[in-house]
Image: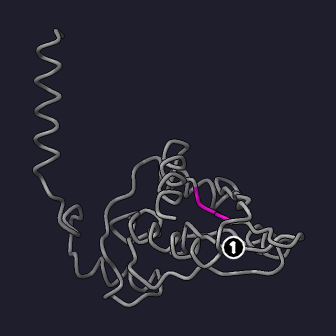
Amino acid sequence: MDTDSTLSIARLKHEVIGSTPVLPFSLLSGDVGSIRNAASRACDVPLSAIEDIYPCTPMQQGLMALSSKHTGSYINQELFRLEKHVATTRMISSLKDVINAWPILRTRIVNIPHVGLVQVVIKEEITIPLSRNKKELVESYTDSTPSLGDRLSQFAICEGNSPGESFVLWRAHHAIYDAWSVNLLLQDIATCY
């Protein structure tokens, strides 16, 4: 393929992507109302909290299947030490803003009969727990594994052992992120702060 053809394809791709809005629920096939009701029950949220639903990728399906067979697999838990000048309340506000801006951080995966695994984007009040005991917080997150219908991304803030020491704990299922997106997420949190 010559350079002109490559540029033409790139322009066409940009035009198509830039001009084609994807409406909520438009990627579903079947009875959207029934799918929404089933997702609402599976996630234990009101129907009005469901912002969108779309199919899972084959990779997401595989990761969810593997993590259901091997407890704790494909779950990442990171503890980020905050600089002493970082205000906890401001960090909580920044995390909430980023979570609201990134639908994938509010996504749950459920199995809908006759449809399969789908991603359900939930719009709900974001809470960021604040813990005074880092060890207990880390253990509580480590001891639980998200399954179908559960939150796949959770943030918390905890104090350290030294005065002024604090951390952000982030636990996420690999079905909703990759290494590239983690860097973007951290940049957005820093920018928002």
Residue extending farthest top: 2
Say how the picture is coloured. Answer: one colour
For label 1, the crowd category at 10 Å Cα-Cα, with few meaning under 14, some 14 to 19 and many 20 or more, is: many
Q: Answer above or below: position of 35 versus 103.
A: below
Specify whether 63 is left or right of 171. left
Residue topped by disc 1: 157
Residue under the point 61% across and 53% down:
66
Could you tell me which quadrant the N terminus lies in? top left
Q: Is residue 99 magenta?
A: no
- The answer to whether residue 109 is visible is no
Amino acid marked by disc 1: Ile
Q: Nearer the viewer, residue 101 or 190?
A: 190
Q: Is residue 9 left or right of residue 80?
A: left
Residue beneath the point at 60% across and 61% down: 172
**Vertical placement of residue 54 versus 59, above or below:** below
Q: Position of residue 91 (x, y in %)?
A: 59, 71
> Which residue: 12% across, 52% down?
20
* Segment tinted magenta in the rendering: 169-173
Residue 82 coordinates in the image, percent (x, y)? 70, 62
Q: Nearer the viewer, residue 92 or 175?
A: 92
Q: Considering depth in this image, is 16 or 46 the residue closer to the camera?
A: 16
The part of the image, by quadrant, that contains residue 142 is: bottom right
Residue at 75 percent of width and 74 percent of height: 158
Whether residue 1 can be seen here:
yes
Residue, far bottom: 46
Circle 1: element type: strand
Relative to 128, does residue 82 appear above or below in the rendering? above
